[in-house]
Image (cartoon, grey):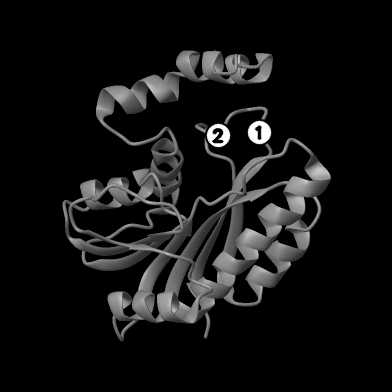
Amino acid sequence: MSKPTRTSRSWLDRQERDPYVQMARRDGWRSRAVYKLEQIDAKERLLRPDMVCVDVGSAPGSWSQYVTRKLKGRARIVAIDILPMDSLPDVEFIQGDFQDDAVFEQLLQAIGDEGADLVMSDIAPNSTGTRVVDQPRSMYLVELALDLAKRVLKPGGSFICKVFQGEGIDDFVIETRRYFKRVKVMKPKASRAGSREVYLVARNIQL
C-alpha cells in the first residue's frame, strides 16, 4: 500500500477539523454539502410539500436526504448519478448517464407527465488541481444540468446548481437569464472560504 501524500494528509486533516463535517456526522447527514442546500433554502424557500424534485449528480445523497427530511416525505424525489448511491426513503434513484437516451427516458417516466418543480445539481468534476483543465470540465457539467432543467421543469419551476468562478461563468449566468425570470449567484456560509464554488439559483422558468 502506498503512503498517503502530503496533499492527501492535509485534506484529511482539514476534513477532520471542519465543523460542518463534524455536524454532518452528528446529525446523520451523508455529507457536509447538505448545509449548503439548507442555507440556500433558508433564504430562497425553494422547497414545498408535494413538489417533484430532480437531484442531478446526487451521490452520496445528502441533498435528496435533506429534501425528504425537510418535507417529511411529502415530495417525489428522483435522484440520478453515474455513481452508485445507497437508498433513501421516498427517493427513486436512477444510476446512469442522463445523456443516454434510455436513461433519460427512464428519468422522464419517473418525473411524470407534469414535469418537475425543482432541478438541483451539486455536481462537480474530479479535480486535477489545474484550473485550465478543471474550469472547462465544470462548465460543461453545469451546461448539461441547465439543459436538463430546461427539458424537465414545468412552467414556473426552479433550478439550483454549483458553478465555479472563472472563465465561462458570466456567459452561463447570461444564458440562464434567457430562460428564468430571476437568477442570482450565492455563496453559502458552508462553502469553504478558499473555494471558488458558488451556487446559481434560478427561479420561475419561462417556457
Q: Toward the viewer: 200 or 105? A: 105
Q: Residue furthest front?
A: 1
Residue 191 tag number: 2
On screen, residue 199 versus residue 49, left or right, reads right
On screen, residue 99 versus residue 165, left or right, reads left
Instruction: Give the residue at x 48% y 72%.
Output: 204
Residue 104 place in picture, x, y as percent: 43, 77
Callout 2: SS: loop
In this view, 103 is above or below 21: below
Residue 56 place in picture, x, y as percent: 45, 60
Callout 1: SS: loop
Mark 2 Cα-neighbour bin, 10 Å: few <14, some 14–19, many ≥20: some
| Spatial CA span between label 1 and label 2 | 7 Å
**Is residue 153 in view from this perspective?**
no
Residue 97 place in picture, x, y as percent: 49, 67
On screen, residue 201 versus residue 84, left or right, reads right
Q: In which quadrant of the rendered view does residue 110 lie?
A: bottom left
Residue type, numbered disc 1: Ser
Q: Are marks 1 and 2 in contact (CB under 8 Å)?
A: yes
Q: Toward the viewer: 165 or 92? A: 92
Quarter of the figure that contains the N terminus: top right
Mark 1 Cα-neighbour bin, 10 Å: few <14, some 14–19, many ≥20: few
Residue identified by numbered label 1: 195
In this view, 175 is above or below 155: above
Residue type, numbered disc 2: Ser
The number of numbered discs placed on residues in the rendered structure image is: 2
Q: Toward the viewer: 114 or 99? A: 99
Instruction: Give the residue at x 50% y 50%.
Output: 122
Residue 63 place in picture, x, y as percent: 37, 48
Instruction: Give the residue at x 79% y 42%.
Output: 131
Q: In which quadrant of the rendered view does residue 60 lie?
A: top left
